[in-house]
Amino acid sequence: MKHYIHCHQGFDLNKGGTVGYLSGLLDSMEQINKFDGEKGLEHAFLFPDISSNDRLKNPVHLSLKENTPFTEAYDLNEYSKYRQYQDWFHSIIPEVEALKINIKKITSIHIHGAYNFLPAYNFLRSCGLENKVVKILTTHNPWKPEHEDLFHFTKNKTIEQLEKQKANIDAYTHFLKLRDKYAFSMCDALFFPTKHSMDGYYESWPEFSDIIKNKPVYFSLTGTEKKDVSIPKDLMRDYLGIPREAKVLLYMGRFIPMRGYDLYVTAAKKILENEDNV
């Protein structure tokens, strides 16, 4: 049995995100000449090559409130004036991307990011395919997506600015919660790197267990191309002023609490207090 991986943006090992991930996956499988996974599942990579007869002829853009299941997002409440956030719930993928999808043969769609679920779902709904296509969700967040988005939304604001913008922040949070609820509730399957990568969801989202209890959850480790060292270690130490006999710890990741940077800083301080040669 084959599992088809659609690479709509083409092949490019130097790009990040989905393009780089899928390109790295294909490149690694080609190098080891092995394309099968568990239980004999064979992976086949497909690049855009769709006949005009199989493309969506006239993409139907949804109206603001009609024909969407996201009624909570439009309830008259204290947040109703924040139209820019309500617009998320009737958004749809760009036409240039819609034309890359073979609507006659599509059986599943892998959605990267909770923020991408709504446009993808609305596209399927506009085609009458929302219940016929398996919707797989990967969020790329170690915690509930709401928390990371809210962090970026408020990180550069002063206390005074936060107080003045409290109503807007509350509205933003309200719609983030709805977005995450719909994305995880309405997807058909979830895709994580490992079981451990779900720990943050259980800790930050009390409803998470109930939301996913009847959904299939799949795991797949990710990787990247191994790079050769271009600068000798001792030369790099001399350039950075690091003693040659010192131990060096390297953090690779985003400098935000949701990605574990706060834990790294705490651990680094404790190590530096007790070690002279780090």
Image (spheres, rainbow, N blue to C red):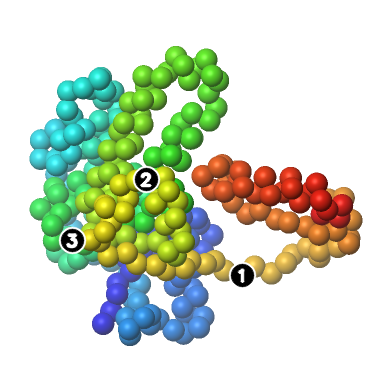
Foreground residue, 97 or 145? 145
SS label for mark 1? loop
Residue under pointer 1: 226
SS label for mark 3? loop
Residue under pointer 2: 205
Q: Amino acid at mark 1?
A: Lys
Residue at screen point 24% across, 45% down: 182
Which of label 2 and label 1 is nearer to you?
A: 2
Q: Amino acid at mark 2?
A: Trp
Q: Amino acid at mark 3?
A: Val
Looking at the figure, which quarter contains the N terminus? bottom left
Task: Tell me: residue 125, above or below residue 12.
Answer: above
SS label for mark 2? loop
- Occupied quadrant, residue 218: bottom left
Foreground residue, 99 or 172? 172
Task: Tell me: residue 203, above or below residue 15.
Answer: above
- Occupied quadrant, residue 173: top left
Q: Residues within 10 Å of mark 3 (few under 14, many from 20)?
A: some
Residues tagged 2 and 1 counted as in contact (Cβ below 8 A): no
Q: Earlier in the sequence, mark 3 or mark 1?
A: 3
Task: Tell me: residue 18, above or below residue 40.
Answer: above
Residue at screen point 55% across, 27% down: 156
Residue at screen point 45% across, 51% down: 200
Q: Residues within 10 Å of mark 2 (few under 14, many from 20)?
A: few
Residues tagged 2 and 3 counted as in contact (Cβ below 8 A): no
Q: Point out which mark residue 54 bears.
A: none
Is residue 133 at least partly visible in the picture? yes
Residue under pointer 3: 133
Q: CA distance from mark 2 to mark 1?
A: 36 Å
